[in-house]
Image (cartoon, helix red, strand yellow):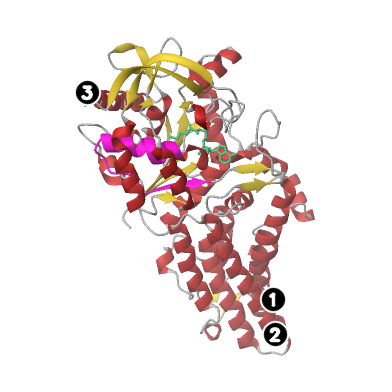
Amino acid sequence: MEKFYLTTAIDYVNGAPHIGHAYEKILTDIIARHYTQRCDDVYFLTGTDEHGIKIQKTAAAKGTTPKELCDENAQKFKDAWKALDIDYTKFIRTTDEEHEKIVQHIFDKLLKQGDIYKHSYEGLYCQGCECFLNAKDLTEDGLCPDHLKKPEVVKEENYFFKLTKYKDAIIKHIKDHPDFIVPEFRANEVLNQLEDIQDISVSRAKSNVQWGIDVLGDDEQSIYVWIDALSNYITALGYDNENPSENFKKYWPADVHVIGKDILKFHSIYWPAFLLALDLPLPKHIFAHGWITIDESKMSKSLGNVISPTSVLESFNLEHPDAFRYYMATSAPCGRDGNYSDDDFKEKVNAHLANSMGNLLNRTLSMLVKYFDGEVKAEFKGENPLAKKALGTIQIVKNHFDNFEIAEAGLEITSLVDATNKFVQDTAPWTLAKEEKMDECGQVLVNVLDIMCIIASLIYPYCPNIAADMAKQLSFDLKTKLDDLTTDNIKCGKLISKEDIKPVFLRLDSELADKSAKKQ
Ligand code: MSP
């Protein structure tokens, strides 16, 4: 694998980030970090979607300008991603001058080649979706099914894109590439939507929407959000109609666009059509994740249950975001909806990260210090009864990642931790020590520590800080590529002293966690 280019959806900036936005960025960051363990060149793009009527109206209601609102809120997204250790390569804003310029050229090219035409139109516009809806897709009460709001009737002369021209090619692509849409069960929904697809409006009258990119040579129209937003995936790489940049040549097509299920239509129908019209290759995968609910209810401003990701870190006094990242990433199987609840969060991370994984490392290292003064002797190295399971787990985890099954991969890692814990229980190194079978005792401890290096490596994408703490205590190089991992990781000689053994994750609400929180 020479490169891996992955992207998130770009978030609307009419509010601050919530844990639904965070879920997607965490999943993508985990995928990115996993692939850095398999290839040297990973490019991870995220950003904000800043034009459109929604932003224009929110700014007006706040008595500010759209640009000021965008600047203020884009910063909140950047701050949140920093707090969550989202290690992106580039953060694009659709108000970036470079992006705006390229979008104008893309639009112009499509117009000149006849894929975009002008047309007088009356339709039902949902501001939440930032798109026109078909009457048949509304609820019985005439509301947008996603936003439960009545769409406004808009009569305008707009530019239209000939989506219908590309319908057959897209259907063929989806059928020929069963892994184009992930999870596969969503492909049928898309094929159904394609059945009655119409040409789509790609501009709005400036008299109604001023906050948008101008159409070149037409003072009365601004480019409508989806062609602007979707293009970010190529403008960020410096796409240019005539003279594609080195980055573009190197990274396009994207290996995966990570998006929510609500915007799958735009990514699996509109985006491929724009790309076909531009004569560009299509992305390899569109991974549509499910939605995060709060205590099993939809997150919404009106219900007052919108949770910001940083508020979770603060309310649990978390030193780093690993527990939250782990919890979110494992909250739902691939493509399904997940749920956040404070109690469940506490219970799950205490069980998995503190009791199982953290404790296993802690007590194994403590025994090594107690019985051997932290010294690994040559006699302790040998066959590892856990080798088959551990090496098998690496392979299974890789396979899950290739299918974007992030929670499923997480469960495999937990299962390796459980198997290792069981091995310790079954072999009882403390009894071996009592019986003075010291070589056997040392072998068990080193067997476990060798596997802990693999666990640190596998858990790294989810919990980079915990993994780094584990690796430090194991003198293990976390940069080791997954394919180079073996079960012989612990070097002979002094591994650790008592004062260097530190719990890698403290139980939430434990006395120690309280104390360390108060110290800050
Ligand atoms: N701006 C568009 C995307 C353009 S991509 C070229 C948009 N923005 S959004 O802010 O509404 O959503 C951004 C992403 O967050 C989407 O992928 C969306 O599915 C995701 N989520 C928003 N709320 C969510 C949850 N409650 N749960 C999980 N993801 C959710 O759509």
| Residue type at numbered disc 3 | Lys
* The N terminus: image quadrant: bottom left
In the depicted structure, whether residue 145 falls above or below residue 519: above
Give percent across and percent down for residue 210.
44, 13
Q: Nearer the viewer, residue 357 or 188?
A: 188
For the view shown, which residue lies furthest in the right direction?
511
Q: SS of the residue at dot 3? A: helix
Nearer to us: label 1 or label 2: 2
Q: Which residue is mark 2?
A: 433
Q: Nearer the viewer, residue 79 or 174?
A: 174
Q: SS of the residue at dot 1? A: helix
In the depicted structure, whether residue 12 falls above or below residue 340: above
Q: CA distance from mark 2 to mark 3?
A: 81 Å
Nearer to us: label 2 or label 3: 3
Few, some or many residues within 10 Å of mark 2 (<14, 14–19, 20+):
some
Which contiguous range is marked in magenta? 265-289
Question: Can you tell me whether the CB of the residue at mark 2 lies under 8 Å from the nearest atom of ligand 1?
Answer: no
Give percent across and percent down for residue 338.
62, 48
| Residue type at numbered disc 2 | Ala
Give the numbered dot on residue 112: 3
Name the residue at 45% across, 51% down: 182
Q: Earlier in the sequence, mark 3 or mark 1?
A: 3
Q: Earlier in the sequence, mark 1 or mark 2?
A: 1
Q: Nearer the viewer, residue 499 or 242?
A: 242
